[in-house]
């Protein structure tokens, strides 16, 4: 979200409510337009101005709607991703954010309260595998290299939070599975650091808090038509390292 101007207007109010909270940072896991747009420069630039109203450090990841799905309305997905990067691949004030070097600047990493946070460009829509397998392969090579670095760093800290747009557990009836290797990587991570791994994603528009793989907790955040957010903290109390709850509407 937002998927429409109506939802963008609602987002203004949500930003005000978030700004009233004491937070270390805010993350949006992608899809800042609908699956049929708008995909225009005007819409993306308006979202950049809107996100600038957050008083907390703000991190944005790409979803599928703002680049891969823009082919539905006549745009070139790679040109749209380049535009996204030009607008949002920036430093984040008051957050020790690292971006992956090279063209995949949307992959990010930072450390907070001795926990490693890593953001990855893994979009919905089967991870763009069916539409552009070459793009998929090159991007995922960079994604997995970045994730491997985050895992190595997390061994020296208390835990790891993986953020992406796609729901990697969304199933397909036919064709190649764009998330098979993602699930394999997450399964190995869960086995190696049980209780210390949190996956946060969006994509399928349903709030979930569960354990789809042994050792890995998963939170799926709200999506359109809901304009809501979830609040998390590093608890270090009881069996769970993280506490997550949906914020009131």
Image (cartoon, helix red, strand yellow):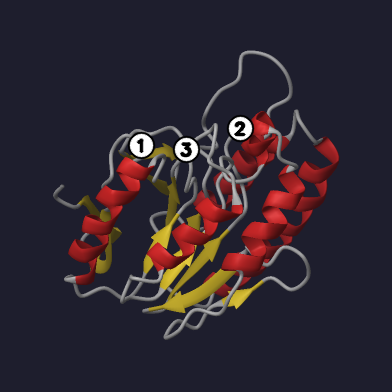
Q: CA distance from mark 1 to mark 2?
A: 16 Å
- Total marks in image: 3
Seen in the picture, residue 216 relative to 120 is either above or below; the reply is above
Q: Mark 2 and mark 3 in contact (Cβ < 8 Å)? A: no
For marks 1 and 3, give the one nearer the viewer: 1
Seen at 65% across and 32% down, the residue is 73
Q: CA distance from mark 3 to mark 2?
A: 9 Å
Q: State whether residue 239 appears in this view.
A: no
Seen at 62% across and 53% down, the residue is 121
Seen in the picture, residue 98 relative to 26 is either above or below; the reply is below
**Other residues around mark 2 within 10 Å, as few (<14) / some (14–19) / many (≥20):** many
Residue 179 falls left or right of residue 192: right
Seen at 82% across and 50% down, the residue is 138
- The disc label shown at residue 224, or none: 1
Q: Mark 2 and mark 1 in contact (Cβ < 8 Å)? A: no
The residue positioned farthest toward the front in the image shown: 42
The residue positioned farthest toward the top in the image shown: 173
Percent position of residue 29, x then y: 46, 52
Residue 55 falls left or right of residue 197: left
- The disc label shown at residue 125, or none: 2
Q: CA distance from mark 1 to mark 3?
A: 10 Å
Seen in the picture, residue 98 relative to 138 is either above or below; the reply is below
Instruction: Give the SS element for disc 3.
Output: loop
Q: Which residue is identified by label 3? A: 203
């Amino acid at each position: 979200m937002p998927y429409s101007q109506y939802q963008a207007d609602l987002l203004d109010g949500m930003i005000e409510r978030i700004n009233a909270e004491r937070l270390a940072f805010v993350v949006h896991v992608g899809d800042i337009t609908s699956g049929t747009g708008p995909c225009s420069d005007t819409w993306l630039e308006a979202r950049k101005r809107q996100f600038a109203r957050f008083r907390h450090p703000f991190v944005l990841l790409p979803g599928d709607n703002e680049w891969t799905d823009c082919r539905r309305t006549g745009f070139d997905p790679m040109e749209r991703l380049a535009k996204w990067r030009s607008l949002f691949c920036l430093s984040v004030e008051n957050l020790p954010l690292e971006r992956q070097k090279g063209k995949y600047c949307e992959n990010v990493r930072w450390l907070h309260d001795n926990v490693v946070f890593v953001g990855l460009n893994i979009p919905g829509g089967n991870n763009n595998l069916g539409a552009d397998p070459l793009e998929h392969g090159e991007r995922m090579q960079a994604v997995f290299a970045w994730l491997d670095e985050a895992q190595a760093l997390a061994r020296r800290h208390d835990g790891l939070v993986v953020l992406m747009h796609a729901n990697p557990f969304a199933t397909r009836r036919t064709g190649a599975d764009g998330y098979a290797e993602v699930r394999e990587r997450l399964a190995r991570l869960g086995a190696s650091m049980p209780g210390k791994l949190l996956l946060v994603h969006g994509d399928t528009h349903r709030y979930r808090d569960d354990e789809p793989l042994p050792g890995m907790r998963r939170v799926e955040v709200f999506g359109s038509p809901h304009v809501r957010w979830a609040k998390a903290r590093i608890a270090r109390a009881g069996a769970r390292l993280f506490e997550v709850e949906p914020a009131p509407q």
